[in-house]
């Protein structure tokens, strides 16, 4: 598990965690941002950090699953261009990010 935080004056205002499963070449991403820090770029920086950690590996897809009513998380994932993938439950939405893979 990898956890990264962003602080503002010593107070944590956001966190992203990655649970990596190298055998399946996936990582589940979870994140949160305090209400006061939303729409300030904290969420984008957290997702960028997660994407940056996955990019050197090159073969690990990132997945984020959120409740359908979590409009803030959905808006952030869509703004970062994480495509939505099919889920088996109506009350959750899932998104996937794939690192650029080198052409061979």
Image: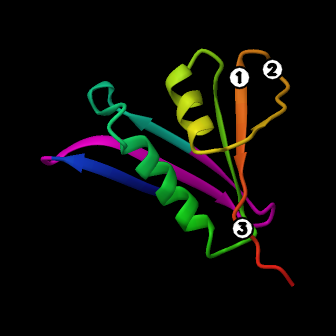
- Under circle 3, the secondary element is loop
Q: Vertically, is 22 above or below 98?
A: below
Residue carrying label 2 = 89
Which portion, as a residue range, is magenta?
9-29
Tags 3 and 1 touching, CB below 8 Å: no
Q: Pick whichever of labels 3 and 2 is earlier in the sequence.
A: 2
- Residue 15 lies left or right of residue 23; in this view the side is left
Residue at 57% in and 38% down: 79
Residue at 71% in and 27% down: 93
- Which is more foreground, mark 3 or mark 2? 3
Report, in whole angstroms, how far the alpha carbon at label 3 lies from the one at label 1: 27 Å
Residue 26 lies within the magenta run = yes
In this figure, what is the number of numbered marks? 3
Residue 50 lies within the magenta run = no
Report, in whole angstroms, how far the alpha carbon at label 1 lies from the one at label 2: 6 Å
Report, in whole angstroms, how far the alpha carbon at label 3 lies from the one at label 2: 29 Å
Q: Where residue 1 sits: x, y (%)?
A: 53, 58
Q: Is any part of residue 1 visible from this angle? A: no
Disc 1 crowd, CA 10 A, few/some/many (<14, 14-19, 20+): some
Which mark, residue 100? 3
Task: Quarter of the image for the C terminus: give it.
Answer: bottom right
Residue at 36% in and 32% down: 39
Q: Where residue 80 sits: x, y (%)?
A: 58, 45
Pick out the residue farthest to the left.
9
- Under circle 1, the secondary element is strand
Residue carrying label 1 = 92
Tags 1 and 2 touching, CB below 8 Å: yes
Disc 2 crowd, CA 10 A, few/some/many (<14, 14-19, 20+): few
Q: Where residue 9 sits: x, y (%)?
A: 12, 47
Scheme of image coloration: rainbow
């Amino acid at each position: 598990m990898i956890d990264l935080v962003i602080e503002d004056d010593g107070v944590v205002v956001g966190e992203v965690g990655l649970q990596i499963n190298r055998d399946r070449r996936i990582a589940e991403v979870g994140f949160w941002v305090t209400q006061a820090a939303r729409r300030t770029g904290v969420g984008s920086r957290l997702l960028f950090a997660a994407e940056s950690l996955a990019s050197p590996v090159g073969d690990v897809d990132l997945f984020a699953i959120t409740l359908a009513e979590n409009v803030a998380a959905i808006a952030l994932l869509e703004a970062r261009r994480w495509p939505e993938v099919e889920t088996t439950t109506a009350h959750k939405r899932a998104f996937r990010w794939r690192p650029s893979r080198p052409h061979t």
